Every structure is written in structure tokens, then in C-alpha cells.
Image (cartoon, rainbow, N blue to C red):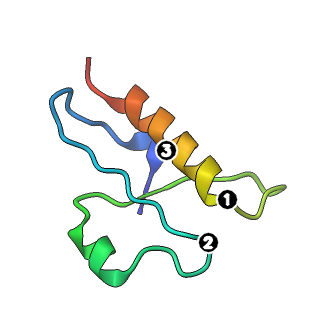
């Protein structure tokens, strides 16, 4: 998976954000359907983000990644 801060998205691209629960994550079929898989790096003080926090961070980062 690519660091989410390095992802660029075309302004007219259709984007679907899929998030999975900690532990099981996304099904293999969901992962295979994705064109791009990203990861959210976290500091050493944090083990993981809950799915709601991860979705919020990802939506914000992907919004900023759109070519303007």
C-alpha cells in the first residue's frame, strides 16, 4: 500500500473510499477490486486508528490530493 500523503487524484476521477475494521480489514475481493491501496502512517505513540478516524483522515487527505 502507498502512503496516503503521496497519492494524487485527477480532478474528474471517481473515487470510492473503502475502509475495513482493525484486524480483519477488507476482504480479499474488496482489495482486488481497488485500483489503489493506501496506508495512513501513525506515530510510534499510536498503535492504530479506529475505522471512523481512519475514514476521516483518508477523506481529508484524498480531498487535498485532487488535482485542481
Nearer the N terminus, badge 2 or badge 1? 2
Q: Which residue is mark 2?
A: 22
Extreme residue toward the left, this view = 12
The quarter of the rendered structure image containing the N terminus is bottom left
Judge from the rendering whether residue 66 lies leftward or rightward of residue 61; answer left or right: left
Above or below — where is 10 with respect to 40? Answer: above
Image spot of residue 49 (x, y percent)? 68, 57
Q: Nearer the viewer, mark 3 or mark 1?
A: 1
Q: Secondary structure at mark 1?
A: loop
Residue at image point 49% right, 33% down: 60
Image spot of residue 42 (x, y percent)? 68, 53
Q: Secondary structure at mark 3?
A: helix
Above or below — where is 45 with respect to 63? Answer: below
Image spot of residue 11 (x, y percent)? 20, 26
Cα distance between the residues tagged 2 and 3: 15 Å
Cα distance between the residues tagged 3 and 1: 12 Å
Q: How many numbered marks, from 0 up?
A: 3
Image spot of residue 61 (x, y percent)? 47, 36
Cα distance between the residues tagged 2 and 1: 7 Å
Nearer the N terminus, badge 2 or badge 3? 2
The image quadrant of residue 15 is top left
Residue at image point 22% right, 69% down: 33
The quarter of the rendered structure image containing the C terminus is top left
Q: Which residue is mark 3?
A: 58
Q: Which residue is mark 1?
A: 50
Amino acid at each position: 500500500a502507498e502512503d496516503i500523503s503521496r497519492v494524487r487524484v485527477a480532478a474528474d476521477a471517481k473515487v470510492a473510499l473503502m475502509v475495513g475494521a482493525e484486524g480483519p480489514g477488507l476482504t480479499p475481493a474488496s482489495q482486488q477490486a481497488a485500483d489503489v491501496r493506501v496506508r495512513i502512517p501513525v506515530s510510534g505513540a499510536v498503535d492504530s486508528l479506529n475505522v471512523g478516524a481512519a475514514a476521516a483522515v483518508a477523506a481529508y487527505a484524498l480531498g487535498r490530493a485532487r488535482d485542481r
